[in-house]
Image (cartoon, helix red, strand yellow):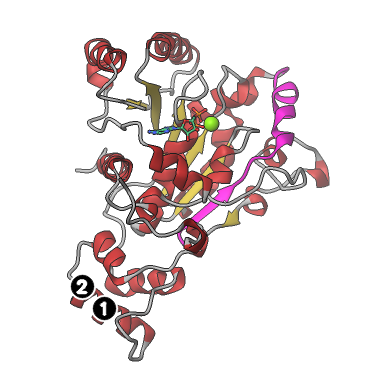
Amino acid sequence: MNDKKKPKSKLKAFRDHSFSPNQLVDLTGLSRSSVWRKVQAVRQGAVSSKSEVSWNDLAEFYKASGQKKRDSENKILVFANLKGGVGKSSLSSQVAMRASALGYKTLLIDLDPQAHASLAVGFSNLDEDVPTIMDCLIGKGVDKKDIQEVIQEVTPFLSIIPASLSLNFLEIKLQPDHRRAERLRSILSPIRDEWDLIILDTNPSASTVNISAYLAADQLLLVCATDYLSVTGLRQLFEILKDLQHDFKDFAPDIKVVPNLFDVREAMAQTSLGTLRQSYGEYLSHTVVRKNVDLKEAQSLSQAVWLYNRKSPASEDIVSLTDELLADGEA
Ligand SMILES: Nc1ncnc2c1ncn2[C@@H]1O[C@H](COP(=O)(O)OP(=O)(O)O)[C@@H](O)[C@H]1O
Ligand SMILES: [Mg+2]
């Protein structure tokens, strides 16, 4: 079906991507000639219309054209579910890549030792020495790092605090002191104005580190696969959120349930989506993310799905979800 795709070997990862004129038209909504005029102005010289635009060129382009983010407040988005395999890492990393390419300065923080979100934007989790958020949350004296020291740049618009297998120890070390649940929020507070978006990918458990992420959230995105167990599991998560509202008076994030892995041909998916609409209608996102193999394939190349295959349903859904999340809370 997708036989017009480029051979994979020629595709670069997201961080090394250079944009074709058509891709810039897609991103900016401007006409091809207008985009190209602006790119030439930024580069201060003639370039052939066939040449491609690097991330640095794009950064200059956004700076010069003022076509950057809308006037929204910066915000912290947390992708959550106690269950694994529902698409937290896939959606958080894809939304981060999309928002960043639209010119939103985005910081992705990976809180899962499996590091799927890190991998999705091109960071390996095999290097146990890679500094993670753990180095800011725990550690004493010289071992303790400032959050600025653990941020790594992917592109001029996207940075990451990657995860590594060593995050596994975080749980044990954080557990004895429940008040530490609020530490993550206080660590993020001095840096939040430097970012348009901070996106956290959590791990599949009711762990202290996840609770600390929920407490830091402006918007909590409960990613839910459209199957029976996932929908049932969502109730548990809402119970935990209720307890948190009781324990922490300030805890009042905007909550959104994001249905994922929807396959219209599966009766169970239809039923599950119906149940979600009935039980959580007020929280449900407009975007329902369909099950689509392009998402997996793009991930395996550390690429954004809309750059991997622009016409894929997965691209449509990621673009739509990102637009929806960016628009939330805007006047
Ligand atoms: N919409 C989708 N279409 C196809 N595959 C998907 C979709 N969402 C997630 N996946 C795949 O499902 C698996 C689990 O997704 P992942 O994002 O790792 O879940 P989680 O972070 O919740 O554990 C991965 O292999 C991912 O590629
Ligand atoms: Mg994950």
Q: Is residue 149 left or right of residue 66?
A: right
Can I make out residue 95 in this image? yes
Tally the marks. Answer: 2
Give the structural element (helix, strand or loop) at label 2: helix
Image location of residue 268, percent across then percent down: 31, 13
Query: Which quadrant is home to the N terminus?
Result: top left
Give the structural element (helix, strand or loop) at label 1: helix
Up-down relation of residue 241 to residue 294 (above or below): above
**What is the three-letter code of the residue carrying label 1?**
Trp
What's the magenta region?
A: 156-176
Residue that label 2 marks:
32
Dot 1 crowding, Cα within 10 Å, few <14, some 14–19, many 20+ = some
**What is the three-letter code of the residue carrying label 2?**
Arg
Q: Is mark 2 within 8 Å of ligand 1?
A: no
Up-down relation of residue 305 to residue 87 (above or below): below
Q: Residue furthest bottom?
A: 45
State which quadrant residue 255 falls in.
top left
Circles 2 and 1, Cβ within 8 Å, touching? The answer is yes
Residue that label 1 marks:
36
